[in-house]
Amino acid sequence: MGTKLLVIDDDPNICESLKLYLENEGYEVKCAADGFEGVNYFKMYEPDLVLLDIMLPRKDGWQVCREIREVSSKPIIMLTAKGEVFDKVLGLELGADDFMVKPFDSKELSARIKAVLRRYNSRGNDVDDEVVKFDNIEISHQKYELKLRGESVDIPPKELQLLYFLASNYNHVFSRDQLLDKVWGFDYLGDSRTVDVHVKRLREKLEGVSDKWVLKTVWGVGYKFELLQ
């Protein structure tokens, strides 16, 4: 069985053209015409990647992204006609893996799909027990779940991905650009200070949880998850 893609877009011409092009590329493609149908299709069809338009009837792309991220870490590429930086930032905050602005070149989209799938598969996200544990903290990348002192804590997808990456590579320092590349996964078009914002929010959640590790700033370099003696 080939790689399965789900296109969620209310423009029938876009859906049809994407379906024809991507099927010629060897993918299996399903299309949904609105957000409500898209969420249901995702649960039934279990695609390997979602192409998700933002402006959708019944449920917009933001809500669809939220609902998919509640149950899955499968890649999402968001599609928009706006091209606004705000859209990109919000999409990334909600857990999207990439962003394409309409109108887009089909060959570029195909290349983005391959790159996102390659990054996703290289992370080994099909492993059910992909969990990092230290004193009073447990981070599940597969379930998108953070537990502090055994209690689940609400956390946006990108914050969890950032924390998971740092904790998985404990005691290793990463620059902001490295974190953007590793966690956001492509050339981020916004301000690199978005990493600082995410770290600040993480520290608020992690304050006082343990004295055996710390999310540390290495001045002039970046950040690390440091295990303490």
Image (tube, helix red, strand yellow):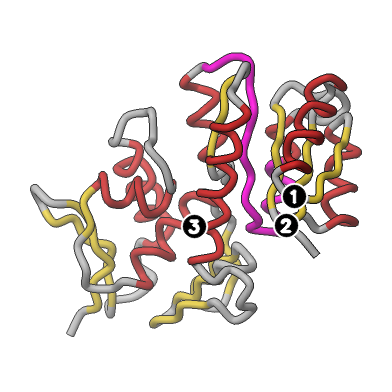
Q: Position of residue 66 (x, y in %)?
A: 69, 44
Are dots 3 and 1 in contact, CB under 8 Å? no
First in sequence: mark 2 vs mark 3: 2
Residue 193: numbered disc? none
Three-letter code for the amino acid on which mark 3 is drawn: Arg
> Which stretch is magenta?
65-83
Q: Are marks 1 and 2 in contact (CB under 8 Å)?
A: yes
Q: Nearer the viewer, residue 14 or 46?
A: 14
Left/right of residue 132 with respect to residue 154 in the rendered view: left
Q: Which residue is mark 3?
A: 119
Q: Amino acid at mark 2?
A: Thr
Which tag, 3 or 1, sits closer to the chain's start? 1
Q: Which residue is mark 2?
A: 3
Q: What's the residue at 83%, 34% (across, down)?
A: 35
Q: Amino acid at mark 1?
A: Tyr
Which class describes the residues within 10 Å of circle 1: few (<14), some (14-19), or many (20+)?
Answer: some
As rendered, which of 196 and 41 lies closer to the eye?
Answer: 41
Task: Tell me if residue 102 comes above or below residue 58 in the rendering.
Answer: above
For the C terminus, which image quadrant? bottom left
Name the residue at the front extreme: 24
Indicate whether residue 50 is drawn in magenta.
no
- The residue depicted at 49 percent of the width and 57 percent of the height is 119
Q: Is residue 67 magenta?
A: yes
How many residues crowd mark 3 within 10 Å: few (<14), some (14–19), many (20+)? some
- Left or right: 58 in relation to 140: right
Cα distance between the residues tagged 2 and 3: 15 Å
| Distance in Å between CA atoms under marks 1 and 2 | 5 Å
- Vertical arrangement, residue 218 with respect to residue 38, above or below: below
Per the rendering, the mark at residue 27 is 1
Q: Position of residue 54 (x, y in %)?
A: 69, 26
